[in-house]
Amino acid sequence: MSDGAVLAQQASDSNRQHRLPWSRVRPWLFALLILVVLAVLWEIVKVVFQVSDQKLPHLWAIGSAFFDRPRGADGPLRAAILFESALATFGEALAGFVIGGLLGILLAMLFASSRLLERGLLPYVVGSQTVPILAIAPMVVVGLGQLNAPDWLAKAIVAAYLTFFPVTIGMLRGLRSASPDALDLMRSYAASPLQVFVKLRFPAALPNLFTSLKIAATASVIGALVAELPAGSQKGIGVEIIKAAQFYNANPPLLFATILMSALIGLCFYGAVALAEQLIVRERKAE
Amino acid sequence: MNTPAIIAIEQVSKTYESGGGPVVALQDINLTIAPGEFISLIGPSGCGKSTLMRLIGDLAQPSAGSIRVKGKTPEQARRDRDYGIVFQAPVLYDWRTVRKNVELPLEVMGLNDTPRSERANAMLSLVGLQDFGDAYPWQLSGGMQQRVSIARALAFSPSILLMDEPFGALDEMTRERMQAELLRIWGGAETDTTVIFVTHSIPEAVFLSDRVVVMSPRPGRIERVISIDLPRPRDVTTREAPRFFELVTEVRESLHEH
């Protein structure tokens, strides 16, 4: 193929993608199909193994749980209450994601600049992740509570605790991903260390960074949620989960509804990061 | 040679430390290169031809001996931006457009926006890619990518062009076209550019060079330096000239002498 033909071919490929929405709709339809299959499986399992409604409610029961009015006929829908809780948790997770993300990037830059620092500090970073988050969360919540810190901050810090680790590892790998030739090229330009970082190492690290940010996004939701479990929290989907679990016998579908809602937060967060990735590294060739 | 040397290599050796003891990559290399000369380094793998190029470009340091580039150390020459480098892989930054890739060295050197993009456009025209400035590297064929790499290396008019098997990854037809292209660009450059060209292709070395430096391995040393007296400008007819075949044979025989 001649030089021009290669480009023309690629241009027409992408045109075709715009003209036919089918190729864009198809993955979503497929995801929907899987959802339907899972729902059918759920109901089949119930019938075949004779699982009681108490253990595994019908899907429509879970669905209708969203439309309860727990605070009386004039009160808000359960969906609205859960959504408000979800928003609170999302906010905490987001704050933790930002704190943890920045910390992770900073640590990675530190480790990339010095093998000595990496050897000395990385074991502690890894060690931090082997401590159960369930043990850390109450300590942070209680400790910060005594300092009169705002309620959301403790949760954000627990979320950040789970977030910074994948970001550190991913970013470190990314910062080291520039090829020796690319570095030699910068050397031949007599580029300063700052220029090498800004023009080569950082942009080269972005694909790895985004991979780790996607992991961090879902982890931060878990962190915020776990931090809501200790007594004393006012709102958040974690609080709703605890309440629903306490009164499970009275209303089994409610627990499933709250779990569904918390999964939705993680999905939305992941989607947002994936979208940002698309916008920022879209010009690169798919690997 | 009576012209003052642009590169003077005296008694240079390079030894690597490896697990199985020191490895002598280059031994007692002496070579003088005149300004504007096109020099090819040829030899089997392990003969140290790439290492020699890297020593000249201050990408590695010799274990013994001295290298002077325009009367300076290679390090000073590098700081003065005397070197343009083209590797076997195009090494384009895939997050930059073709034009932005060519602008990269100019950005590092602190050139302002307008002269920078003007210069990049001129370089892209020189390599025949003026219509592809806004494309991304992965949208180009291998040959086109390597032309971008050459445009980038020449963007800041370095006096010395170091090329490490730049056409090694291309198919034979593209390769011959690129060789002719390179000679045209080299001949058309506003300054007298000296080229150090590492290759393992005999016809390529003969077609391009003023002198072919034949090297042999273990330890890497210079076997012979063969002057190529083919007239310039060279084109497809050069490849069919009897003298071309004589020289190819001469290079081949000195490669197989040991």
Image (cartoon, coloured by chain):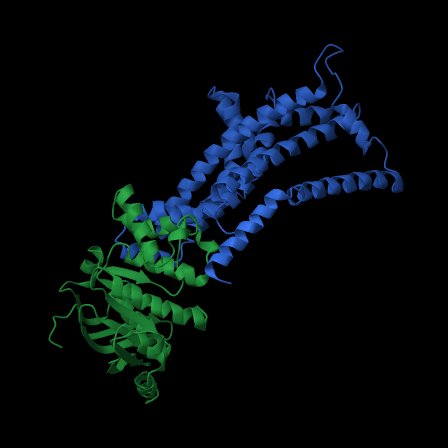
Give left or right: position of A198 versus A79: left
User: Horizontal and vertical percent for residue A51?
Assistant: 85, 37
Residue found 29% across the figure and 81% down from its top: B214
Compare residues A265 and A187 and report the one nearer the observer.
Answer: A187
- Find chain A in the image and tell me its colour: blue
Residue at the farthest front position:
B237
Give left or right: position of A73 versus B145: right
User: Horizontal and vertical percent for residue A141?
Assistant: 53, 26
Numbered disc total = 0
- Find chain B in the image and tell me its colour: green
Compare residues A32 and B138 and report the one nearer the observer.
Answer: B138
A166 above or below A141? below
Residue found 60% across the figure and 19% down from its top: A234
User: Horizontal and vertical percent for residue A181?
Assistant: 36, 60
Give residue A22's quadrant in the image: top right
Look at the image and tell me whether residue A119 can be seen. no
Give residue A265's quadrant in the image: top right
Residue found 55% across the figure and 42% down from its top: A215
Give left or right: position of B69 versus A96: left
A1 above or below B238? above
B45 above or below A198? below
Image quadrant where one finds the N terminus of chain B? bottom left
Image quadrant where one finds the C terminus of chain B? bottom left
Residue found 19% across the figure and 60% down from its top: B77
A222 above or below A111? above
Compare residues B147 and B198 and report the one nearer the observer.
Answer: B147
User: Horizontal and vertical percent for residue B11?
Assistant: 19, 76
Look at the image and tell me whether residue A76 can be seen. yes
